[in-house]
Amino acid sequence: MLDHLIKGADLVDGTGAPARRADVGIRDGRIAAVAEPGTLTESARTSEDAEGLVLAPGFVDPHTHYDAQLFWDPYATPSMSHGVTTVVGGNCGFTLAPLRPEDADYTRRMMSKVEGMALKALEEGVDWSWRGFGEYLDALEGRIAVNAGFMVGHCALRRYVMGAEAVGGSPTAGQLDAMVRLLREAMDAGAWGLSTTQSSTHSDGDGRPVASRHAGPEELLALCGAVGEHEGTQIEAIVAGCLDQFADDEIDLLVEMSVAAGRPLNWNVLTVDAAVPERVPRQLVASERARKAGGRVVALTMPILTPMNMSLGSFCALNLIPGWGEVLGLPVDERIGRLRDPAVRAEMLRRADSKEAGVFRRLADFGRYVIGDTYSPENAGLTGRVVREVAAERGQDPFECLVEICARDRLRTVLWPMPPDNDPASWALRRETWEHEDVLLGGSDAGAHLDRMCGAPYTTRFLGDCLRGRKLVALERAVRMLSDDPARLFGLRERGRVAEGYHADLVLFDPARIDAGPATLVHDLPGDSPRLDSRAVGIVSVRVNGVETVRDDEVTGAVPGRVLRSGRDTRTVPTR
């Protein structure tokens, strides 16, 4: 007997094949039957009529930071509500394990600074009782609603072995051997491989470059060599050039890392903007050189423009513009004074528009910003207005106008940047870029930067755009890009497609309504900390391993997700 039968759905199976009407039967967490409507003779305990609805494989998000959130939110909201059934965590070199007890506070403060996780939530929502990576995975086992796999972070390896010397120091031969052993132990326990960062934007809670930024090529290649010894592993790496354009030595490093491991390496995020036409070809040189050398380098890119907010009063992307952190890190009164100084503003604008600002140059057109929440009587009525219009009325330049508005709110004003790459040429370039064999959709950062951005709904917003908006790709291809493509990159066993014998990770949605609601600020984290949330629209049901976890955008309370472990749940993906 079947556990559940979905009848008469428009099946988009994840392979890219044309949609077809089908009945799909589920038994023991797997897809037991896919048949023409009305032809199945086996009875089912429960069933539902899915006529007019699309049934697709559950989506796989290849770049999240749910490492901590899953402890207080086993549903990985809002991702699961948007059809995501498998998340990949442990990215960018940052994980909560391995961990020495005395390093828990350092790790919390680092994650709060570098990944925008609320410190109170980390303190109150996680018990921090593990040491080894396997213990961390065991702590999640049986208590999550999504499937989750994790890389092991280079920063955690360094801190565990080198202590405080991990920041600023180089390992001895013995310490490097210890890091390699620790990585092997993590992969034996199920870690998916190594993640690391050398990005200039990644600093710890003390404002110093995070531990992995002090690693040289010899250390990185030794760790990559260990990755290649284990079944079903990967590498994820971030370098400074990910933000704009790779330097030659960065391309060489990424290629060497993939070749040393004999494994795919993915990085994020490939920003596509027709105003910078040289960026995409330059970034994909890494993939082309890797292919020739016997490796594989995969770029993650987002198919939507991610909603985000900013502020002059709290840490956000503006702090990452060269030279801006020195001003925006000052105490509020001193910061306001400096921002009101015309010479200081002129220098900040010069730095923001310089080549060294890279992709952050996108943030420098302050006339395009929209004013969000305000907090003072002087700013009443400004919410929703564009800075350029207000500046023209006041006879000010846009940045001066923006500073004065924020100063009246003691810098608490919420700012919404209008993306400059929302033009037809940029969308055409995105469609062209998605054709590349080493470009994969993803890079949501879900679980991180919680009060500043909301990338998790990219799945539903992309599908809505494909069905009723720009229609850049057909529905069947869009579903494959969200499910089977990432499943194949990570070597997921029997996931990513709707096929007999596969795990029953499924999403059922209304093609006439599928979309994501606007990002709104809610206070539902431990310690009443804020985050941006977005409701799913048109998602009828989500199933993980055959068990319904979402019905009409409400979680059911079931926790059928599994911790996916390398080797057991993933197979090695060849680089050729």
Image: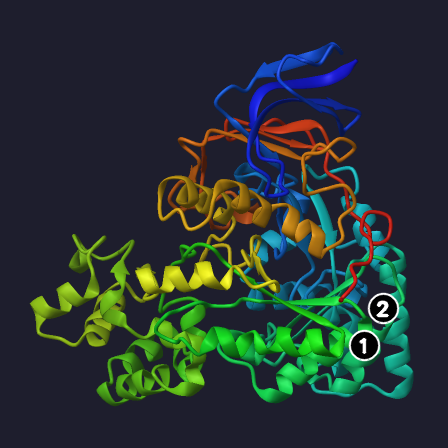
Q: Are marks 2 and 1 in contact (CB under 8 Å)?
A: yes
Q: Is residue 2 left or right of residue 441?
A: right
**Closer-to-camera residue (474/236):** 474
Q: Is residue 23 above or below residue 312?
A: above
Where in the figure is residue 559, as x and y percent of width and height?
Answer: 70, 33
Q: Is residue 32 left or right of residue 379?
A: right
Q: Which residue is mark 1?
A: 260
- 520 vs 118, nearest the viewer: 520
Q: Secondary structure at mark 2?
A: loop
Disc on res. 19: none
Name which residue lies at 26% across and 71% down: 366
Q: Residues within 10 Å of mark 1 (few under 14, many from 20)?
A: many
Which quarter of the figure has residue 415? Answer: bottom left
User: Which quadrant is the N terminus positioned in?
Assistant: top right
Left or right position of 50 against 275: right
Circle 2 sits on which residue? 228
- At horizontal 79% and vertical 62% (from top left) the residue drawn is 574
Determine whether 276 is above or below 316 in the image: below
* Mark 2: few/some/many CA within 10 Å (<14, 14-19, 20+): many
- Asked which quadrant contains residue 190, the reply is bottom right
Residue 203 location (% of width, % of height): 58, 76
Q: Position of residue 232 (x, y in %)?
A: 82, 57
Q: Judging from the image, what secondary structure is the residue with disc 1 in?
A: helix
The numbered mark, 2 or 1, whose residue comes first in the sequence reads: 2
Residue 199 in sight here: no
**How far apart are the two marked residues, 2 and 1, measured between alpha carbons?**
7 Å
